[in-house]
Amino acid sequence: MPTRRKPPIPVSGVVYGEIIYWGTCISALLVIVGTIRSFLETGSLVSVSYLLDAALSGKNVETIWAASEIQRVPNISFYISTWTNGESLTVIGIAAGVLSVIPAIFFSSVYLWRSNNHIFAIVALISGFLTLLAPTGWFSP
Amino acid sequence: MTWTKRLPELQFLILCTVCCYAFLELFITPNQLSTFSVLSAIDLILLSFLLSVLVAIISVIAGVGGGVIFTPLMLAFTSIDTLIIRSTGLVVAMFSGLVATGPFMRKGLADIKLVFLGSLPILTGGFAGSVAAIYLAKEMAETGDSFVRLLLGLLLMVIATIFVLGGASTEYPEHNDRSKLGRILKLRHMYWEDSLQKPIKYKAHNIKAAIGLLFIVGFTGGFFGLGGGWAVVPVLNLVMSVPLKVSAATSGVLLAMGNSAAIWPYINVGALIGVIAAPWMLGQIIGGIMGAHILASIKAAFVRKVLIVMLFATSVKLTARGIEGLFGISIPLM
């Protein structure tokens, strides 16, 4: 007789989903605070109007940042060191959402290993390390 | 609106976002933009947010990633630097998938084994694509931009054609051949089908071909800032014989992971501008949730037809702009 019972849901998947879900919610709140701060701060590092005007007028990325108050192309270290700034906080918020994938992968791999899915646990670990390496900029041109 | 009762955190997030934009619009006096004298910076941010909500709703209903709509439209009809558009495109492609990961996993719709099977080709492909995009922009500058527009115009024609032929997708694909690799990896699973009130079993097939295709999808997604929802669902459904519902859910989760690596080269060259990307990110989260609930009550086929027409029109414009830039000729189009 065919079963009508709901199949069990893998814990590794639920753990993966919950970490990313809450990470994304927190990152969205950071982005909201960053956006408000960008418009409220008076002595900001980069003016919001300048960034929008420069981008809309078709200037390339390097020109936009070179002509801004910071006079150099920012990377993630710059954003972290100036995290109280609205623009930096907004980028950090987006990055936090993106980074939530990393703990999710590692925790999920533990549960995959425990459930005897060893191949997928190892693949998850490799994916986790690749995702971890991406922010470092080692492979960037 | 039972979902708001079940997900109070999302209700809170929507409230915060609406309050944020209402506060900015009502209480802050911003500078007028010189490029758009009728709009202030805040007006533009609010407009971007509303457009992002609309893009997210359309993309969820049409079953594609938001990047497929955002990136081509912005590349075709604005003069914003292509790296800025492509990095924001990845944000658009990623965030509706990120926020949907939790609900998809809780319901058991996304298959975690398939997610990790596709993770390596999607991650490496996406990362290689974004590195290639930045290399091209540095080496070829304006010519590189025109080249990207031309290539994307042609790719978009292919995507639109896939959508036209999309009727080939099957809800519960059947496959008689046994996949050896699928058996070794134990790629069989089942999910609860609400509409039938019974569990559906499935087995994944053609694993090697799917891995190769996912690498290509990852590369194009990272290179053009498109994401890849348009291609991952067909790969899972038509190539691997995974049920359509599981394919759609797994695709969203997989792309969110793949794009999370692809976006870093863009962030590290300053191409992700927070004030531009923020409204698009928030709009994707909110619009993605709204779209998922509207989906139940409207005819997705109509939205899909509108999307196909839009993709063809955008591809013509992109191709024309690419040819104009590369060969210095003028093609009179809107």
Image (spheres, rainbow, N blue to C red):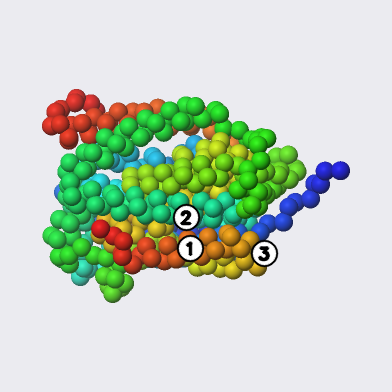
| Residue B52 percent across, percent down from the top left | 39, 46
> Badges 1 and 2: C-beta atoms under 8 Å apart?
yes
- Callout 3: few (<14), some (14-19), or many (20+) C-alpha neighbours within 10 Å? few
Observer able to see residue A129: yes
**Occupied quadrant, residue B203:** top right
Dot 3 and dot 2 residues touching (CB under 8 Å): no
Q: Quadrant of residue A95?
A: bottom left
| Residue at 68% from the left image edge and 35% from the top image edge | B176
Q: Nearer the viewer, residue A49 or B88?
A: B88
| Within-10-Å neighbours for mark 2: few <14, some 14–19, many 20+ | many
Observer-nearest of B93 and B327:
B327
Relative height, residue B175 to residue A84 (above, below): above
B46 left or right, relative to A22: left
User: What SS does tag 1 mark?
Assistant: helix
Structural crowding at the residue carrying mark 1, measured as other residues with C-alpha within 10 Å and reported as few (<14), some (14–19) or many (≥20): some
Residue marked by disc 2: B120
Which chain contains the residue that carries disc 3? A
Q: Which residue is mark 1?
A: A126
Circles 1 and 2 on the same subunit: no
Amino acid type of the residue that numbered disc 2 sits on in the rendered structure? Leu
Counting from the top left corner in percent of width and height, residue B82 is at 25, 46
**Distance (Cα) linking label 1 and label 3:** 18 Å
Q: Amino acid at mark 1?
A: Ile
| Mark 3 lies on residue | A115
Q: Position of residue A59 (x, y in %)?
A: 17, 50
Q: Earlier in the sequence, mark 1 or mark 3?
A: 3
Relative to residue B53, is residue B237 drawn left or right?
right
Q: Nearer the viewer, residue B170 or B47?
A: B170
Residue B192's label in the rendered image is: none
Q: Secondary structure at mark 2?
A: helix
Say left or right for B199 vs B28: right
- Same-chain status of marks 1 and 3: yes
